[in-house]
Image: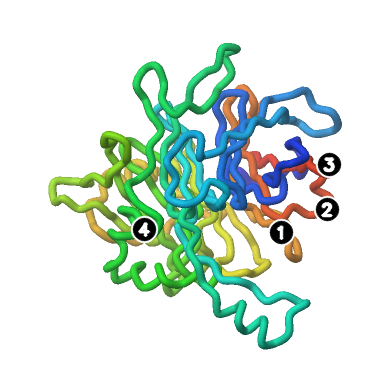
């Protein structure tokens, strides 16, 4: 379990027209290549491993952007953000998920009271936020990993069945007694907000930043199957149930990211509301076995181990992306990468370059 932080140990260089460097929200590796997503874009970026240019341990750059509109039929407009918050690599696919949540306009210092009151009352849904999809990993002529709409071996990009208003997941949750009432509440108001994604066997785990219910954070377990052009929710067992709910004791925090490492599930947790508060990493030992053995529609897990608090600042340095480094990148022992939304000025190597942290065992 990581409990030692090497600050600013990983440098990420982005193109000058990109916004990802300031809004990193998801990350995953395929070999030496780092995939990242921004919560204010509608695509993913691939970064190549490069030689270090300073004191950092690892350096990634030469970004290549993959717009989702080139890979999928999106529920919303091509330039409408997808608010991607979770990412995982499994079975030859890069999986991505949007927050699925509503958003509320914020007050602005240059508006009068009436104008700000009007803004604060406006709630809307960006359709692309309700996106759960798998994107086939392929190789280009130079052997570099790429994303394809359809591969030569028949794998194709596919979203979960849905439209501009909802998808199979939100329709399934609409009458759920725990999460249904929160679908109409914006994510930053403790409403429904997906921020973590992990894959095991034929299952997906979706970690919720909100709502946190009486201190319990939520993780949704679903299964999907491929249709002709879309993914459909599948039964989890012989009962036909398509949803299991897991409630985690994270000391009142919500899920910011999920990542399997072997049999254990690591949970990045932070405040649900718009707060500058401690962000911690938890370990759920033998989560694979426990999830496989569980057949209850709702289960409560209180034995997660808090091990590490990540840096955070005043309105900055919010850790939102976390993943395990491949062995060939980790060096002398296991290592984990943490990336930050709203990075503090000292995390900027240059205008479009940012530093992430390495987490190691002390």
* Quarter of the image with the C terminus in it: top right
- Identify the element where label 1 is drawn: loop
Camera-near label (2 vs 4) is 4
Q: Which residue is mark 4?
A: 166
Number of other residues with Cα within 10 Å of mark 2, as a class: few under 14, some 14 to 19, many 20 or more:
few
Q: Which residue is mark 3?
A: 349
Camera-near label (3 vs 1) is 3
Q: Is residue 342 above or below residue 2?
A: below
Q: Which residue is mark 2?
A: 345
**42 with respect to 286 (left or right):** right
What is the distance, in whole Å, between disc 2 and disc 4 at their CAs? 38 Å
First-in-chain label (3 vs 4): 4
Q: Which mark is residue 238?
A: none
- Identify the element where label 4 is drawn: loop
**93 with respect to 339 (left or right):** left
Q: Are marks 2 and 4 in contact (CB under 8 Å)?
A: no
First-in-chain label (2 vs 4): 4
Residue that appears at 55% across and 22% down: 145
Query: In the image shown, does 282 or 62 lie closer to the viewer?
Result: 62
Q: Which residue is mark 1?
A: 312
Report if residue 91 is visible in the image.
yes
Residue farthest to the front? 77
Number of other residues with Cα within 10 Å of mark 4, as a class: few under 14, some 14 to 19, many 20 or more:
many
- Identify the element where label 3 is drawn: strand
First-in-chain label (3 vs 1): 1
Residue that appears at 72% across and 75% down: 108
* Quarter of the image with the N terminus in it: top right
Q: Position of residue 185 (x, y in %)?
A: 46, 72
Camera-near label (1 vs 4) is 4
**170 with respect to 268 (left or right):** left
Query: In the image shown, does 318 or 98 lie closer to the viewer?
Result: 98
Query: In the image shown, does 318 or 135 lie closer to the viewer?
Result: 135
């Amino acid at each position: 379990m990581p409990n030692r932080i090497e600050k600013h140990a990983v440098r990420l260089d982005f193109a000058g027209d990109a916004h990802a460097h300031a809004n990193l929200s998801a990350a995953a590796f395929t070999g030496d290549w780092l995939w990242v997503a921004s919560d204010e874009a509608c695509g993913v970026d691939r970064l190549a491993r490069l030689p270090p240019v300073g004191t950092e341990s690892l350096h990634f750059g030469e970004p290549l952007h993959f717009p989702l509109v080139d890979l999928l039929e999106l529920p919303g407009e091509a330039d409408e953000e997808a608010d991607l918050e979770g990412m995982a690599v499994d079975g030859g696919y890069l999986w991505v998920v949007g927050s699925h949540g509503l958003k509320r306009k914020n007050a602005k210092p240059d508006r009068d009271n009436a104008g700000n009151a009007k803004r604060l009352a406006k709630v809307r849904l960006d359709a692309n936020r309700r996106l759960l999809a798998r994107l086939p990993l392929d190789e280009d002529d130079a052997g570099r990993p790429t994303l394809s709409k359809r591969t030569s071996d028949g794998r194709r990009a596919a979203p979960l069945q849905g439209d501009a208003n909802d998808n199979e997941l939100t329709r399934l949750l609409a009458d759920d007694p725990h999460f249904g009432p929160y679908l109409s509440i914006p994510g930053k108001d403790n409403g429904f907000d997906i921020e973590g994604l992990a894959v095991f066997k034929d299952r997906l785990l979706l970690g919720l930043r909100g709502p946190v219910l009486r201190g319990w954070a939520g993780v949704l377990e679903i299964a999907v199957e491929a249709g002709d052009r879309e993914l459909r929710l599948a039964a989890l067992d012989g009962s036909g149930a398509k949803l299991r709910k897991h409630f985690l004791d994270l000391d009142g925090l919500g899920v910011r990211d999920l990542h399997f490492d072997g049999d254990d599930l690591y949970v990045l947790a932070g405040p649900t509301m718009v707060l500058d508060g401690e962000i911690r990493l938890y370990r759920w030992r033998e989560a694979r076995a426990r999830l496989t053995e569980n057949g209850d529609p709702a289960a409560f897990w209180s034995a997660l181990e808090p091990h590490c608090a990540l840096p955070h600042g005043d309105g900055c340095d919010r850790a939102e992306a976390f993943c395990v480094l491949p062995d060939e990148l980790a060096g002398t022992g296991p290592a984990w990468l943490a990336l930050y939304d709203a990075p503090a000025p000292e995390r900027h190597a240059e205008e479009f370059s940012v530093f992430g942290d390495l987490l190691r065992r002390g």
